[in-house]
Image (tube, rainbow, N blue to C red):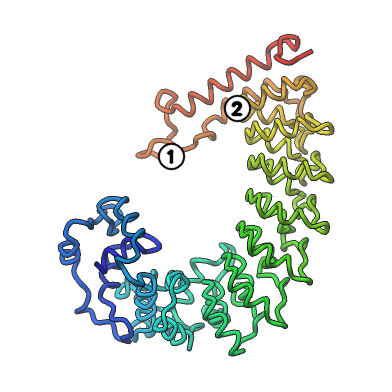
Amino acid sequence: MAALMWISHSERPLKVDELCHALGVEIGSTDLDSDNVPSIRTLITCCQGYVSVDKETSTARLIHRTLREHLRGRPQLFNGAHSTMAETCLSYLNSHQVKALSDGPSRDLCRTPFLEYSSLYWGVHAKRDLSDCAKQLVLKLFEDYGNHISTEILLREEKPEHFDLFFDELVLFSHLHCASFFGIVEIVTLLVEAGSCDINQRDCIGSTPLVWAALNGHEGAMKILLGQDDINPNTANGSGETPLCCAAKNGHEAVVKILLGQDDIDPNRASGSGETPLWWAAKNGHKGVLEILLRRNDVNPDKPDKDGRTPLWCAAEIGQAGVVKMLLELGGVNLNKPDKYGATPLWCAASSGHEEVVKILLGRDHVNPDESDNSGKTPLMCASQNGHEGVVKILLERGDAIPEKPGSNGETLLLCADDGGAGTAAIHPRGDADHPHEPRSDRRNPHRRAAKRALARIRALLRRPKSATPGAA
C-alpha cells in the first residue's frame, strides 16, 4: 500500500530507484539503511499487478490513469498520505548520509537517488498536511539549512536562468525564505515570532521571503509576513521585480489583492527592464489580475518597458484578444504606440497571424493600418511575408490599407509574399525525426505544403484588381 500511496500522491512521476529508496526510509531515523530498500522485483510483486515500470523513462506507474484518480479520490485508503510523505522526505534530508554531502562542492549523489525529490517537494507535502512529527523534522533541517545540500538543489531548480549560484552565498537563503517559498503558514508564523532573522533579508538571488511567497501565490504566508511592522512590501528581487510584480506575473489574484491593500504599496513600480505589474499581467494573459489592477486610479495602463513595449503591445503580440479588449475599453491607451523598433500593436498582431486581435484593433477609430516599423514594413507586408492569409484578407477588406505602399528598401507586397515562399520552412522548422538537420521534402511535409498553398492564395489576393477586392468600395 505504501508504494501505491507514493505513486498516486507524488508531485511528479517517481523513478523506480527513487520509489524504492523512499520505501526504505525509517521515519525519524538519522541513518539510511540500505537493507531496508526493496528491490524492483520485490516492489512489482508486492503491488500485485497494479504497478508497472515504464522502460523509456524508468518511472513507476499505475496500470491505468483512472486508478490514480481512484486512489487520490479516497483519502481514507492512505490516512495522512501527505504528512507521511513529508516526514519521509525530511527524515531522508536529516540523515547522516545526506548531511555529509553538504561539506563541499564535490559530491557523489549516486547513492542518494531520493535526494532531489525530497529537496524539491518536502515542503509541498508539508504544506498540505503538517504533522507534529513533520514540524519537528522541519526545525531540525532548519538548524543549518543555508549549508544543507537541499538548499542548492532547490535554488538551482527555481532560480531565474540569468542568475548564477555561488556556493558560499547559499547561506543567505534562510529558513524563513524556505518556509515562505513553500507557504507553510505554521512554520512561517513560528519563525517570525522567534525573530531569528531579518524579515526583509535578500537571499543569494536577491529575493526576500515576501517575494518568494508572492511568486508562488501563498496567501497565508503573505498575510503573516505583511503583518510585521518592519516589513517592506516594495522590496524587489535581483531583477528589480517587487512582490506585486511577481504575483501579477504568475496570475495570483488573491495575493495581488492582499498586496494592493497595503497603504505603502507602489502599483506602478517597474522592474530593472521596465516591466510593471500590469505589464506582466497583460503579457501573460491574466485577465483577473488585470481587472484588479485597473480598478485603481493610480495604475498606468500604458506604461512601456525599456524597449517601448506597452501592455497593449504585449497582449497583441501573443494574441490575447480578451486582454486587448479590456485595455482598449479602458481608454487612455495609445493603440498606435510603437516599440523602439517601430512596431505597433497592430503590426505585431498582423505579423504573428492573430486574426481576432487584428479585427479588434481595426475596429477602433484612430488605428493606422499602414503604420510601418523602422525597416519600412507595414502590417500587410508582414502578414503577407509570414503567410497569414486570414490577416491579409482582413487588412485588404478594410479598404484603407495601401497595398501599393513600398517598404523603405523598395520592397512591394508581392515581393514580400514571394519572399515568404523561401521562409515557409520557418513555420514548421523541424525535419524528419531521424534527420533533424535535413528539411523534409514538400511531399512529406504537410506544414510546408499548407504554407505554400497559403502564400499562393495571398499572391492571388494581392494581384486582384482593387475593385475586385472583397469589401472594396
Residue at 49% x, 66% y is: 157
Quarter where residue 365 is shown: top right
For numbered disc 1, what is the local secondary structure? loop
**Quarter of the image where the C terminus is located:** top right
Residue position for label 1: 437
Residue position for label 2: 387
Does residue 169 appear in this view?
Answer: no
Are the residues at dot 2 and dot 1 in contact (C-beta closer than 8 Å)?
Answer: no
Viewer-side residue, 192 vs 145: 192
For numbered disc 2, what is the local secondary structure? loop
Does residue 229 appear in this view?
Answer: yes
Q: Is the residue 391 above or below the residue 74 in the image? A: above
Q: Does residue 363 appear to the left or right of 388 in the view shown?
A: right
- Image depth: mark 2 or mark 1 in front: 2
Of the two numbered discs 2 and 1 on the same chain, state the one appearing first in sequence.
Answer: 2
Residue at 79% x, 33% y is: 364
Image coordinates for residue 290, horizontal then vertical, percent: 70, 52
Q: CA distance from mark 2 to mark 1?
A: 23 Å
**Quarter of the image where the N terminus is located:** bottom left
Image coordinates for residue 439, horizontal then vertical, percent: 44, 33
* Amino acid type of the residue tagged 1 in the rendering: His
Quarter where residue 407 is shown: top right
Residue at 78% x, 29% y is: 369
Circle 1 packing at 10 Å, graded few (<14), some (14-19), many (20+), is few
Q: Is the residue 90 above or below the residue 469 in the image? A: below
Q: Is the residue 52 above or below the residue 35 in the image? A: above
Residue at 28% x, 78% y is: 25
* Amino acid type of the residue tagged 2 in the rendering: Gly
